[in-house]
Amino acid sequence: MGLFANLIAKVPLYFEFQDPLMGSQMKRSELNSSLISKLERLFIKRSVRTVFVTKSASLSSIERHPQLRNQIVSIYPGAWRFINLKLNTNVNACHEIELLHLGTLYGARNLNNFFLALDNLREAGCTNANRVCVKNLGGIYLENQDDYLGRTDFELLAPQKRSEALQRALNSDALLLIQHADSRSNETIPYKTFDYLNLKKPIIGVINNPELMFLLDVDSNYLADALSVESIQETLKRFLSEFDLERRGSATFKNDFDINKQFAKIFE
């Protein structure tokens, strides 16, 4: 619609791609790739500015269209604040350490490596490992989903509206950020990352995109390589060794991505 308005009425056009039209994970025929590339070029050429939400996606687009590089930028979007934050001072009656993931688990975005790491820590007698309870608020579409549902330390919560899910997340001790353990994560960042930052809770990231190392303060959050059980194990061990309800309640969590300021950057 925006492209049509620009072609007909010469309305200034700004594009923002939440996901790239072309990505390293997209398997296309040579003809299809050529057509999509031409469409992407048309979008960019007709725009005042074309915005990608990751640096890697913008750099890939510049490689495809170097002559249009001055019209291509990357801007992290931020997220609206749907709830008023209140410190959660309630201690779980079972003294659980609740790790909550918001969203759907499917394909290569799963908890397989995470559970392997957690089980290894329990076998090694790691502090607090037996207190961990993992909950997923959303759907599961995995071949081994019965294995998840059969675990005593896992609970599947029914999907909720976004604002309700974020309110529920305030009751957790840490938020799980799980990326696909394949190339589709290279040029994308889960939008829930910015929702998580707004909640000012510790984030345990099982990630496959180095840009998240920049977005998430490593002093307050815990980041591991999605492809490495050992990395997840060491990161989880650090979280569990540092876990303290009182300290977590007074910790300072940075969020440098105010959605209004990030949106204004599009027009600078």
Image (cartoon, rainbow, N blue to C red):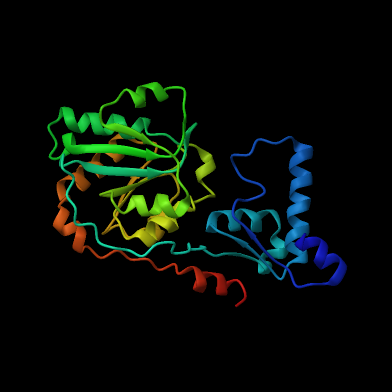
Please tell me in which quadrant of the rendered image residue 23 appears. Answer: top right
Image height of 108 relative to 85, above or below: above
Residue at (43, 44) in percent of width and height? 208
- Using the image as rendered, state which of residue 70 and residue 189 is in the foreground: 189
- Using the image as rendered, state which of residue 37 and residue 172 is in the foreground: 172
Please tell me in which quadrant of the rendered image residue 181 appears. Answer: top left
Q: Count numbered badges in the picture.
A: 0
Residue at (43, 64) in percent of width and height? 81
Image height of 131 relative to 199, above or below: above
Q: Position of residue 259 (x, y in %)?
A: 49, 68
Image height of 107 relative to 186, above or below: above
Image height of 96 relative to 16, above or below: above
Q: Position of residue 233 (x, y in %)?
A: 26, 38
- Is residue 215 rendered to the left or right of residue 220? right
Q: Quadrant of the N terminus?
A: bottom right
- Using the image as rendered, state which of residue 152 and residue 231 is in the foreground: 152
Q: Residue furthest bottom?
A: 268
Q: Position of residue 252 (x, y in %)?
A: 25, 65
Q: Quadrant of the C terminus?
A: bottom right
Residue at (27, 58) in percent of width and height? 220
Q: Residue furthest right?
A: 8
Q: Position of residue 157 (x, y in %)?
A: 38, 37
Please tell me in which quadrant of the rendered image residue 144 appears. Answer: top left
- Is residue 66 rendered to the left or right of residue 117? right
